[in-house]
Image: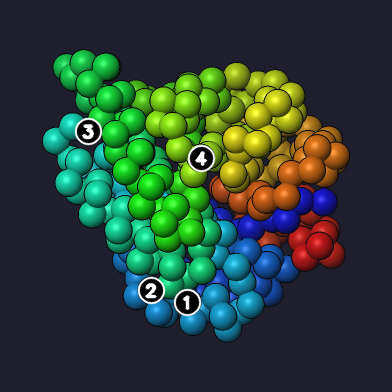
Amino acid sequence: MPRFAANLTMLFNEQAFLDRFQAAAEAGFNGVEYLFPYDFDKLELAARLKRWNLAQVLHNLPAGHWDAGERGIAILPDRAGEFRSGVYRAIDYATALGCSQVNCLVGVAPEGVDHARLYETLVSNLRLAADELEQAGIALLIEPINTRDIPGFFLNRTDQALRLIDDVGSSNLFIQYDIYHMQIMEGDLARTIETHLDRIGHIQLADNPGRNEPGTGEINFPFLYRHLDAIGYAGWVGCEYRPARDTLAGLTWLPRQKLTA
């Protein structure tokens, strides 16, 4: 059975953010992830992880003005300095939290800017980030996201991510493969994961439609769990879904003893 990490941005929203660490541990999780740590003191976050014996599995690079609708700045030619500063800030937090990988949300393509220029900017930024993060012992991930939830998002499919990794030319750049997003965009989940396993650094899940917990939609998750074991996936699986009801009621999709396996 894969190792499952609670996504504290999505799960346990019945509680204040800093209380979600305890809630995740008491629910049986050994790892946590979330979008951004930067609104909180890194030492306080580290203390919560230590107190509840949790691994920090993942967080994102700073992604611009999130509340204003930005979903990453790595493609924006006029924000390269801000992106670089964000890389160093992410390294600072990830090091303090013992987090060995961070994800880069590449951003929504602005209207009127040439695609080639956006892509050139993205390659340059990722090359810098991958190098700086590698020196800190941290892997860099990129995540294809469906265009239904985020219209205009620049990176949408596995094959795009693979080409981008090749163009960046770094051994420290991997795919964050989100089962929910890729079910919407391309399907063929099991074969895609197996074919590109060496390029996948992290997996996330939610069912479709609805982005709720496994078992609420069309995806055959028990098969996928067995498949991940069979092909030797050794990473974490982040539970980045919106509970259909409250979080604990929704955790019946996986027995408690398997959460801690």
Left or right placement of residue 127 versus residue 112 in this view: right
Q: CA distance from mark 4 to mark 1?
A: 28 Å
Q: Position of residue 261 (x, y in %)?
A: 81, 62
Q: Is residue 199 above or below residue 30?
A: above
What residue is shown with label 4? Answer: 171
In the rendered structure, find residue 42 and report the number of the disc placed on it.
2
Please give the name of the residue rendered at 52% of the width and 25% of the height, measured from the top-left corner: 162
Q: Decide: marks 1, 2 in contact (CB < 8 A)?
A: yes
Type of amino acid under label 3: Leu
Q: Earlier in the sequence, mark 4 or mark 1?
A: 1
Type of amino acid under label 1: Ala
In the rendered structure, find residue 46 and report the number of the disc placed on it.
1
Type of amino acid under label 2: Lys
Please give the name of the residue rendered at 57% of the width and 59% of the height, measured from the top-left corner: 57
Q: Residues within 10 Å of mark 2 (few under 14, many from 20)?
A: some
Q: CA distance from mark 3 to mark 2?
A: 28 Å
In the rendered structure, find residue 57 and report the number of the disc placed on it.
none
Q: CA distance from mark 4 to mark 2?
A: 28 Å
Question: Which quadrant of the structure image shows residue 216?
Answer: top right
Please give the name of the residue rendered at 35% of the width and 71% of the height, measured from the top-left corner: 40
Q: Is residue 73 above or below residue 240?
A: above
Out of 157 and 83, give the one closest to the viewer.
83
Q: Earlier in the sequence, mark 4 or mark 2?
A: 2
